[in-house]
């Protein structure tokens, strides 16, 4: 019978494996978005914020994991229809398809319409010819496999209302938007203000509307279910507008769980052509001034920062949680290293962890340092270089990794850092940590205030494994010194 620490380690490995299977499935989803900002109206006063709102949201969607985000600005009717038709082809091959529209919208006779920038709308009869109905937009998303979302920040007080002539007394022209139809399961429509209400374009001096500001804020939080996400947005807008604006969401969703930002906070990988490198790589043979990860360095700092802690390797992790994994023990040494930067610049400090599992012949060198490369949108980078020795070395070539997951107890399921893992080649990987301010603060808390790290790995033979490393928190000197120097 398996008892004590060994049982707890196996339980932790199975928890990690389950999380990784879910994460892997989510990462395989294809998510596409069309973002439209209409502000430069030709026949009514212009709106200041829609174009800025669209650009802000587009970047937030990319950061949340949407692979293809198309941004369009100030569209007339003909161009709007063309853009929607083109996006329909993308939606047909996607799991998620999202359309965000900021600008003027109008409700006539219970039907909602998006108003292009060239609309005149002298009569209610002109609406069908000069605008695009919400149902037309929804129709373009029908081919998406799992989720179809339309987000309308289009309930602004409408200047067209006063000039529209009504030809039928029974045809109403509303002040806001009407409740939408939901044509199929897996549909969601979100309004910046509830049906019949109007929304703010932003107070004087504000560069974005209250609604998109709230959307972007909550898109930065990982692993939030879609309905909860929009409830949080609603509460945020109510608070910031002093209860004057209340967003609304209308949905017909299945029992599946949908989250905007993946639990790993990492964008699903874009497909790569066969044989195409996914990152620039140095020469495979380290020079005399390179470590195993290919980074230049000058020396290890004083041994006073060095500390040794426990490391564990679980191999043979079953996807269905069946057979218990094989668990081997080892050690991890944490230290600081000084990396030369060249050009007369002072050296940079790197936090280095060297983990060895003797019975498996597996070694990992992990180097965490600040990102000083302006071409990368990352606050810090983590380089991970694996090597294997012994008769089974060929079975332990690492092909893929997950994100670092931090936790306080070995039996817990860890919380993933916010970042993007990049495969350089077999046995060599890099994690680029998010530079979004909220993510930076969260990552600092996870990296420097947790007692254990989990790292999921997959060998080239398909076997799943997990490394668990003790950090020495709260007394580890290398961790504490690195954190202090980088502040």
Image (cartoon, rainbow, N blue to C red):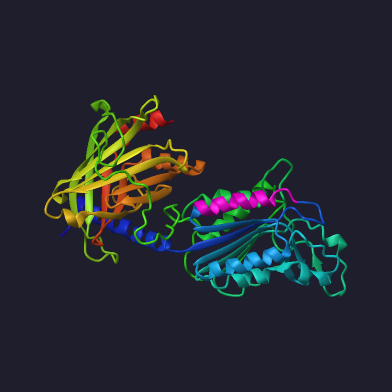
In the displayed structure image, the side of residue 332 where residue 358 appears, left or right:
left
State the image coordinates of residue 110 (x, y, percent, origin top left). 75, 71
Determine the residue positioned at 24% across, 56% down: 10
Q: How many marks?
A: 0
In the displayed structure image, the side of residue 270 where residue 43 appears, left or right:
right
In the displayed structure image, the side of residue 23 where residue 399 appears, left or right:
left
* Residue 208 to residue 31: above or below: above
Instruction: Report the residue that reaches farthest toward the left.
Output: 391
Q: Nearer the viewer, residue 37 or 245?
A: 37
**Quadrant in the picture for the N terminus:** bottom left
Quadrant hosting residue 293: top left
State the image coordinates of residue 121 (x, y, percent, origin top left). 82, 65
* Residue 317 to residue 432: above or below: below
Q: Which residues are magenta?
A: 47-63
Residue 472 appears in view: no
Asked whether 58 falls inside the magenta stretch, the response is yes
State the image coordinates of residue 190 (x, y, percent, origin top left). 63, 62
* Residue 315 to residue 126: above or below: above
């Amino acid at each position: 019978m398996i008892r004590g620490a060994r049982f707890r380690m196996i339980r932790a490995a199975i928890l990690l494996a389950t999380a990784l299977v879910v994460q892997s499935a989510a990462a395989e989803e294809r998510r596409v978005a069309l973002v439209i900002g209409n502000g430069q109206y030709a026949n009514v006063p212009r709106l200041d914020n829609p174009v800025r709102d669209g650009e802000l949201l587009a970047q937030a969607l990319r950061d949340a994991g949407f692979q293809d985000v198309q941004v369009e600005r100030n569209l007339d009717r003909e161009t709007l229809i063309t853009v929607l038709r083109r996006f329909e082809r993308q939606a047909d091959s996607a799991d998620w398809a999202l359309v965000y529209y900021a600008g003027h919208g109008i409700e006539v006779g219970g039907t909602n319409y998006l108003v292009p920038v060239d609309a005149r709308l002298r009569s209610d009869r002109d609406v069908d010819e000069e605008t695009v109905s919400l149902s037309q937009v929804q129709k373009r998303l029908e081919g998406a496999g799992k989720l179809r979302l339309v987000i309308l920040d289009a309930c602004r007080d409408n200047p067209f209302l006063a000039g529209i002539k009504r030809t039928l007394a029974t045809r109403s022209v509303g002040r806001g938007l009407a409740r939408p139809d939901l044509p199929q399961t897996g549909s969601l429509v979100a309004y910046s203000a509830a049906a019949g209400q109007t929304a703010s374009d932003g107070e004087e001096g504000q560069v974005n509307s209250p609604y998109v500001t709230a959307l972007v804020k909550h898109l930065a939080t990982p692993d939030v279910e879609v309905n909860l996400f929009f409830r949080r947005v609603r509460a945020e807008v109510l608070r910031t507008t002093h209860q004057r604006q209340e967003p609304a969401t209308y949905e017909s969703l299945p029992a599946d769980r949908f989250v905007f930002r993946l639990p790993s906070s990492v964008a699903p990988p874009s497909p790569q052509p066969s044989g195409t490198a996914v990152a620039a790589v140095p020469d495979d043979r380290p020079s005399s001034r390179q470590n195993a990860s290919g980074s230049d360095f000058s020396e290890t700092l004083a041994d006073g920062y060095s500390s040794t802690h426990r490391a564990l390797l679980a191999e043979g992790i079953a996807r269905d949680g069946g057979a218990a994994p094989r668990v081997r023990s080892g050690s991890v040494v944490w230290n600081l290293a000084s990396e030369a930067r060249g050009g007369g610049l002072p050296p940079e400090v790197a936090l280095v962890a060297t983990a060895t599992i003797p019975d498996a012949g597996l070694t990992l060198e992990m180097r965490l340092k600040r990102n000083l490369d302006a071409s990368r949108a990352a606050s810090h980078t983590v380089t991970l270089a694996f090597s294997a020795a012994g008769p089974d070395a060929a079975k332990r070539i690492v092909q893929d990794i997950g994100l670092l997951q931090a936790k306080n107890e070995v039996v817990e399921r860890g919380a993933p850092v916010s970042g993007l893992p990049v495969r350089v080649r077999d046995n060599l990987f890099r994690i680029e940590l998010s530079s979004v301010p909220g993510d930076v603060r969260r990552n600092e808390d996870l990296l420097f205030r947790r007692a254990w790290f989990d790292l999921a790995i997959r060998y080239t033979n398909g076997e799943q494994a997990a490394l668990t490393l003790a950090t020495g928190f709260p007394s580890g000197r290398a961790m504490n010194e690195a954190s202090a120097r980088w502040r």
